[in-house]
Image (cartoon, grey):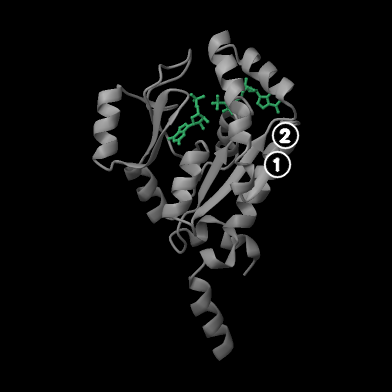
């Protein structure tokens, strides 16, 4: 049996899916990185959050976010429909429970693009399933340049996000891995390496107990 089998579809269903959490200051690149990671690993599932913020140009309801009104969001939140939820930049954001639990139970790995508050809450609830990666920009100057070049937010919003950048970065030490997103291809390669190594972690493969027992009895 080659090691690749441990992470491949042959063993899907024999391990629980892992929760790959990406956080960063706004504009460091986690959305772009997670989209490309999923394009390269189509068996990954993206957790689509609900939010009360308005859609940016090009964003689609149900694909990028579930765009919702504050009253409805809070109803769902107090009804326990979110794995976690938080207020970020004056809007509510939350991770719907249903699709995530379904994917994990099927042994599929789920990618989350959420802030440090969400990462903390997921870790409290599922410490064995969560793998946390913090994405850093090469510099704050380049972070601002990226937010400007993305050209989807007003100067006021960009200034607000830059003001919050340091308080988000302050949580980097709560993460399992840190990737500096300077060269995009290199950062993506590092994320792939983290994903593939974490899929192989012994503790994610309870079937190994029986496999090793059988080996020892040969
Ligand atoms: N390594 C990189 N080099 C240059 N530009 C990049 C790099 N990575 C991402 N970008 C660009 O930076 C901009 C911000 O990226 P992205 O929207 O993915 O950030 P984000 O961290 O998800 O932000 P937010 O938290 O606001 O959603 C995008 O225009 C993206 O194309
Ligand atoms: N705690 C959560 N944070 C979330 C969730 N979905 C997104 N986010 C974070 O919000 C900010 C802003 O996102 P933007 O799309 O408006 O730029 C960013 O840090 C996201 O990671 C969520 O469900 N829970």
Q: Residue lying furthest top in this view?
A: 155
Contact between labelled residues 2 and 1, with CB atoms less than 8 Å apart? yes
Residue 132 placed where, x, y %?
57, 47
Residue at (30, 29) in percent of width and height? 73
Q: Quadrant of residue 162?
A: top right
- Determine the image quadrant of residue 55: top left
Say what secondary structure mark 1 lies in. Answer: helix
**Quadrant showing the C terminus:** bottom right
Looking at the image, residue 132 sits to the left or right of residue 76; the answer is right
Can the viewer see residue 218? no
Q: In the image, residue 9 lies at what x, y percent?
A: 51, 55
43 over 157 or under it: above or below: below
Q: Residue furthest bottom?
A: 217
The 10 Å Cα crowd at callout 1, few under 14, some 14 to 19, many 20 or more, is few
128, above or below 99, in the image? below
- Distance from Cα at disc 1 to Cα at disc 2: 6 Å
Q: Residue at x 74, y 27 (%)?
A: 139
Residue in the foreground of this view, choosing between 180 and 200: 180
Q: Which residue is mark 2?
A: 185
On the image, numbered disc 1 is attached to which residue?
A: 189
Q: Secondary structure at mark 2?
A: helix
| Residue 172 position in % (x across, y down) | 63, 42
Cβ of disc 1 within 8 Å of ligand 1? Answer: no
Q: Quick check: 173 left or right of 107? A: right
Residue sitting at 61 percent across and 15 percent down?
150
């Amino acid at each position: 049996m080659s090691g690749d089998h441990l992470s491949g579809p042959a063993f899907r269903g024999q391990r629980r899916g892992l929760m790959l959490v990406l956080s960063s200051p706004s504009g460091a690149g986690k959305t772009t990185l997670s989209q490309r990671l999923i394009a390269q690993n189509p068996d990954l599932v993206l957790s689509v959050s609900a939010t009360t913020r308005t859609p940016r140009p090009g964003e689609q309801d149900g694909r990028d976010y579930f765009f919702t009104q504050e009253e409805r969001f809070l109803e769902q939140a107090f009804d326990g429909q979110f794995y976690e939820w938080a207020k970020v930049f004056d809007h509510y954001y939350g991770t719907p429970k249903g699709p995530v639990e379904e994917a994990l139970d099927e042994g599929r790995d789920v990618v989350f693009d959420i802030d440090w508050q969400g990462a903390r809450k997921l870790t409290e609830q599922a410490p064995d399933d969560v793998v946390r990666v913090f994405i850093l920009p090469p510099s704050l100057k380049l972070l601002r340049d990226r937010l400007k070049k993305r050209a989807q937010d007003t100067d006021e919003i960009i200034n607000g996000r830059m003001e919050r950048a340091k308080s988000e970065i302050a949580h980097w030490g709560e993460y399992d891995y840190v990737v500096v997103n300077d060269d995009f291809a290199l950062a993506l390669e590092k994320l792939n390496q983290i994903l593939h190594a974490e899929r192989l972690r012994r503790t994610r493969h309870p079937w190994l107990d029986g496999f090793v027992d059988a080996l020892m009895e040969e």
